Each structure stands twice: as structure tokens, then as C-alpha cells.
Image (cartoon, rainbow, N blue to C red):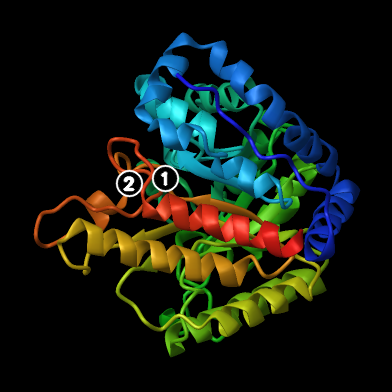
Amino acid sequence: MPNVSYETLKLPTGDMAKRRTFLYGAAGALGFGGSWLAAQQGFSSTSQQTYGSDQGLVASKNHLSNDDNRRASLSDRAASKGLLYGATVTAHRISSDASFAACVARECNILVAEIDLKWKALRPAPDQFDFSRSDRLLDFTQRHNMQFRGHTLVWHNGLPDWFESTVTADNAEQFLRTHIQTVVSQYAGKMHSWDVVNEAILPAHGRQNGLRGTPWLSLLGESYIEIAFETAAQADPDAMLVYNDFGLDYDISEEERKRTAVLELLSRLQSRGIPTHALGIQAHLHGDLTHFNPDKLRSFIQDVASMGLKVLITELDVSDRRLPRDIDTRDRQVAEVYEAYLTAALAEPSVIAVLTWGLSDRYTWLTHFQPRSDGAAVRPLPLDDRLQPKRAWRAIADAFDEMSERDG
């Protein structure tokens, strides 16, 4: 197996310096800048050594082509301009699929718990917490010098079966505070960031403030969002606290209304002194849509940044469900969407991380939730189901490289 070559990290200049100042300056005040910087400085020099500590991971790296083994990973390309790159994973997949785990260790320097930190995974009973799966993910990130993101503390989905019959208007606030305090304290000082509240906005539900109708809104009113952020900040003052949502990407009226409602929510939180540090833009994109306006996306990101907030691209993937069956055609169009979107987003120095919702087509939620009508396997992610880099991988790499070349 040939040695992996990594590109030399560049010193920050121009817009890259602004991006790193934005990241380190605010992060340092919050307490997580140092650990982020240490991870970046240590990743290139230690990544090969960590592979060597696990024979299964070393052997399974051969699933990548020799040509791609000689290329810098996505994480190192991102790090060379002050960004994080990562993906969602589950403890089961990391534990049971050594080939996949090797690719994750190579390509990512931040991981997101896809399901293992949601209520249903953590709360087998009202008075019980089970951290066994999320602890395995934390261990993986620590062994491979990665950052770890928590997803998610408050969401209208992913609630345990006992929730509806147990949580009432009288005890909802206590359940919410106890959950967040317990979970965030479990990983205090070990998390890069938390998606504190997920998908709270849906203008189509007809409320003047744009809020989605959820169990939490019904039980506690809008205060549930403030309670969540305040409790998370108390449990871990060093973690970056993120509001995360989808449907913010395209130049269509529905998403324009949602962008406006999200900005208004963030503004309300700030005006009330609620600790909110970043917006997560999920970026679940579609290979067949032509309504992407890079200027509109950049303007939205600038509006978020004007509040002093960072931006993370948190759940990036590109659905190919309505693209032609021909794989070459599909892969080209998917790659074009990745590169166009990232080129626009990464022009803004407030964007500090890019995370795909999965790394390989072997494991993607779109297989079940947005399948193709012709029965062909979906191909939305950087690696195919054989863990080989695709045009999507190349498009992400190019978006990172072009930013580096422009800044250098």
C-alpha cells in the first residue's frame, strides 16, 4: 500500500486569514478554539500513525484506489484553509464495517452522531440514559484525532415511544432541562458543537413567527427554544451552540420565507441574550433543481454573519432520484451541484465547516426516504457503495482547492 501524501498546510492570507480570525477569535472567547486548533495542527502528522494502530483499518484502506491514496484527504484539503470537513456516522457502522471506518478515519476530521445522540437512542425509559453507542463514537474520534458534534438535543422527531404518554405540560420543562443537562454534561469539554434545536421553523404551519408545530411548542410555547440553549450553555460553556435547519438553499418563495423566519428567530434569541453561536444549514440538495442562486445564498450567509454568528454546512448531500439512470450522467450532475453550492458558500468567511450527511453511498438515508422510481441505487455522497471516490468527491476537493489557491 503506498504512503498517503498530505499537502502542506498554508499560512492564512487574505480571506482565509479572516476566516481563521473569525473562527479562533470567537471560539477562543468561548473556550473551544484551542482544542480545534490543536486538532488541525496534529491531524496531518498523526493520521497515518492512527491507522497503524488498528490493523483492520490499515488493511481496509486498500479499498481506495492507489491514485486516490496519493491524494490529500478531504479533511486535509479543508484544514489547509481553516475549515473542518466531516460526515455523519453511527456507532454500529463504525464497529461492524472496518473498510468504511478506514475511509472515515482518512477523509474526516470531525464526525456527527447520525442517530446515537437523539432522544430515542439515549432514553430507553423516562428515568434512564444509555450512552453506550455515543461513547463508542467519542472513542473513535479521540483515537483518530477528530472533533465530535452532537446531534440533536431538541427535535420534534426521534422521540422515544414513552414520550407522548409521559411528558405533559406540567413536567415538560423539567424533562427538557434534565435531558439536556445530563447529555451535554456527559460530553462537556469533548464536543466541538451541538445542534441544540433542530428544525423549529416551518412557515407553512401558518404561525406569524414561522414556528413549526411540534410537541415541544405545544407543551411549552416558544420558550422551549430559549430553555434549550440556556441549559446547554450551563452544562458546557465551551461548546458551540447551533440552531440547525433545512430548506434554506434555493431561490424559491417557500425557502425565502423560511430564510426570513430563521433570521428573525436568531435575532429574537440574540435580543434576549440567549447563547446562540452558529447556524447549521443542512443543505439537502437536489440534482435536478435549477433554482439555486449563489448570490442569494451568499446574501443569506452574510445576514447570519452580521449577527456575529458562524455558519456550518451540516447535512450536505445531493439527491439523484429524478436524474437519468445512466451513472455517468447522474454523477456529473450531482458533482456539479456540490461544486456550485460549495463555491458559493465557501466564499463567505463565516462558514467554518462542511459536513456531508454520510460519506459513502453504502450508507445513506436517501436509499429509504428518497429512492429512485427505477429501482437503481442512489448515488448522493462522495464515495460510492464500494467506498471508491466519485466525481462528487472530486467536486468537494476542487471547491476546497480553489479556495486555497485563491487565498494563497
Q: Of callouts 1 and 2, which one flags the residue occurring earlier in the amino acid sequence?
A: 1
Residue picked out by circle 1: 358
Residue picked out by circle 2: 364
Q: Do the residues under discs 1 and 2 have CB atoms within 8 angstroms?
A: yes
* Crowd class of label 1 (few under 14; some 14 to 19; many from 20; radius 10 Å): many
Give left or right: position of 319 versus 258: left
Q: Quadrant of the N terminus?
A: top left
Q: Amino acid at mark 1?
A: Gly
| Helix, strand or loop under label 1 | loop
* Crowd class of label 2 (few under 14; some 14 to 19; many from 20; radius 10 Å): many
Q: Amino acid at mark 2?
A: Thr
Image x and y of residue 234, in percent: 79, 44
Quadrant location of residue 42?
top right
Q: For residue 56, which numbered disc appears in the image?
A: none
Note whether 220 is above or below 209 in the view shown: above
Q: CA distance from mark 1 to mark 2?
A: 6 Å
Q: Residue at x 70, y 73 (%)?
A: 304
